[in-house]
Amino acid sequence: MKLQNNNHRNKYINPESRGFTLIELMITIAIIGVLATIAIPMFSSYKLKTFNASAKSDLGNIMIAEEAHYTKNQTYIAFKPLAGYQQTIPNLPGARVSKNVCAKVSNASNSNFTVQTEHFNGDESYSNAANASLHSNKKTIGKYTIGC
């Protein structure tokens, strides 16, 4: 049985070639850590704004659908809180609720209505009445406050 000689590996390695030192690796990891410390909170902030914008957009879409319904029927439609993605809201064709958004219309009559929307992962709850301005209230992230 012949023993293998492993000395042939060393002839291909440049003797002056060096790998990374421990200090170089530690500095690289520290730089990555600093960049992550800056980037992660900014990313979270952008996600939160996106969730809130989704709820605000759904509020506007529902208000437009309510006005379209009023034009045809001279009355507004109320509906119980809906959460999640719906193809259409009952009796309001063209209006829908986005994923993880809760919406409801209350106090509907021949002359007025109130819409409320909020995203499950957002920190704002929005409400608006016909011929009124948009109101927002802070809410707990991860909870619905309007009944979904």
Image: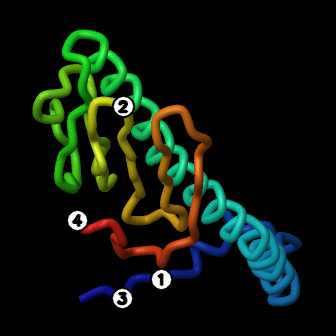
Query: Considering the numbered disc 3 on the image, is that residue within a helix, a strand or a loop?
Result: loop
Q: Which residue is mark 2?
A: 111
Residue at (41, 57) in percent of width and height: 118
Residue 107 % position (x, y): 30, 49
For residue 123, side relative to residue 98 (left or right): right
Q: Which residue is mark 3?
A: 3
For residue 69, side relative to residue 64 (left or right): left
Q: Which residue is mark 4?
A: 148
Q: Amino acid at mark 1?
A: Asn
Q: Amino acid at mark 4?
A: Cys
Is 55 or 42 nearer to us in this picture? 55
Please, is residue 74 above or below residue 104 in the view?
above
- The C terminus, quarter of image: bottom left
Q: Are marks 1 and 4 in contact (CB under 8 Å)?
A: no
Q: Amino acid at mark 3?
A: Leu
Which quarter of the picture shows residue 24?
bottom right
Residue at (26, 31) in percent of width and height: 76
